[in-house]
Image (tube, rainbow, N blue to C red):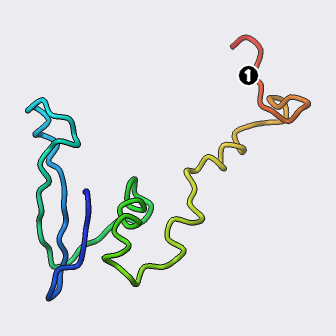
Amino acid sequence: MKALRPRPGGGYEVDYVHHDDLALKRKARQQPVRTITCDRLILGGGTYGTTLLLLKSRTAFPGLSGALGSRFSGNGDLLTFLLTPATASASGRWTPPAGR
């Protein structure tokens, strides 16, 4: 999806690029943008690109929360649970186990 906006009278318009057209040897930015309409639109919260798409469409949706895009995590904070004290150096930084 490239953009989305409410449709006058209800529903939504969704702009997108059909990537099968890449066979035309054009870069993605040069692909023609197509538009479809729908009565209902469901976006998966946290799905790759959803937050950016909503932030880019903020003017079309004045009721969006000001918290959109905040408190976002790529789950990198959970990587610390993979470390054990045996793999942490005295400085607190991870070091690979010997022999790897």
> Taking 73 as reference, is 86 above or below it?
above
- Residue at figure coordinates x 11%, y 48% from the top left: 32
**Quadrant of the image occupied by residue 23:** top left
Assign the C terminus to one quadrant of the image.
top right
Task: Tell me which residue sits at (23%, 78%) in the image.
Answer: 6
Q: Is residue 45 left or right of residue 69?
A: left
Image label count: 1
- Residue indicated by mark 1: 96
Between 25 and 80, the one lying in front of the other is 25
In the displayed structure, would residue 97 be above or below residue 5? above
- Picture quadrant of residue 96: top right
* Label 1 element class: loop
Q: Position of residue 75 (x, y in %)?
A: 58, 50
Instruction: Indicate whether 62 appears above or below 78.
Output: below
Q: Nearer the viewer, residue 59 or 21?
A: 59
From the viewer's perspective, is 86 left or right of 11? Answer: right
Q: Position of residue 66 (x, y in %)?
A: 52, 77
Q: Amino acid at mark 1?
A: Pro
Q: Determine which quarter of the picture holds residue 57.
A: bottom left
